[in-house]
């Protein structure tokens, strides 16, 4: 099956920290081929690992994750979406964090649903499909 969902950084961290049943149930409804993360998310995860008390252990956990969840590289359409979305948000005075902007652009360019625990920020991006699997 083709990729359908792009995992945001905070949902990856939430899963790793808490392994909540409601999120496990949602994951069980999909094949791993349907799930992916942006290279931006991967960078944020490695950043968090480097700042953690156990960088080697945290990095090993990330390596396990990317053995299962594919990482989607940046493409020119993502950059184009970034430019459009950023300009619209700035014009509306509704900016979001730079990495979140890249992740939203990635999801939108690829036509994917963004799975996040940060609905408030991502809802500012018009036309972006967002789901929060942490909500029961």
Image (cartoon, helix red, strand yellow):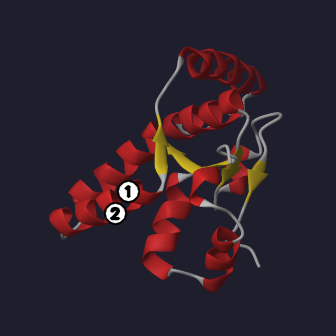
What residue is drawn where x is 77% and y is 79%? Answer: 136
Point out residue 42 in the picture as x, y percentages from the top left corner.
40, 46
Q: Identify the element where label 1 is drawn.
A: helix
Relative placement, left or right, of 13 versus 87 is: left
Q: Looking at the image, which is closer to me, 6 or 48?
A: 6
Query: From where the camera sits, is residue 7 visible?
Result: no
Point out residue 94 in the picture as x, y percentages from the top left corner.
72, 34
Q: Which residue is mark 2?
A: 64
Point out residue 39 in the picture as x, y percentages from the top left corner.
43, 38
* Residue that sits furthest to the bottom in the current view: 21
What residue is drawn where x is 67% and y is 27%? Answer: 109
Q: Is residue 26 above or below residue 8?
A: below
Q: Which residue is mark 1?
A: 67
Circles 2 and 1: CB distance less than 8 Å? yes
* Residue that sits furthest to the front in the current view: 1
What residue is drawn where x is 51% and y is 80%? Answer: 19
Q: Is residue 131 above or below residue 124?
A: below
Task: Give residue 114's mark.
Answer: none
Image quadrant assignment for residue 60: bottom left
* Residue that sits furthest to the right in the current view: 127
């Amino acid at each position: 099956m083709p990729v359908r969902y792009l995992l945001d950084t905070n949902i990856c961290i939430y899963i790793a920290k808490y392994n909540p049943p409601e999120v496990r149930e949602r994951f069980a409804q999909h094949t791993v081929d349907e799930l992916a993360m942006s290279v931006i998310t991967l960078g944020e995860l490695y950043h968090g690992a480097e700042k953690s008390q156990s960088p080697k252990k945290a990095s090993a956990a990330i390596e396990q994750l990317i053995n299962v969840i594919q990482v989607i590289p940046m493409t020119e359409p993502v950059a184009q979406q970034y430019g459009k979305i950023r300009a619209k948000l700035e014009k509306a005075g509704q900016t979001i964090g730079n990495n979140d902007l890249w992740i939203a652009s990635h999801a939108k360019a690829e036509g994917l649903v963004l799975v996040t625990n940060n609905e408030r920020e991502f809802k500012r991006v018009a036309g972006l499909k967002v789901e929060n699997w942490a909500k029961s």
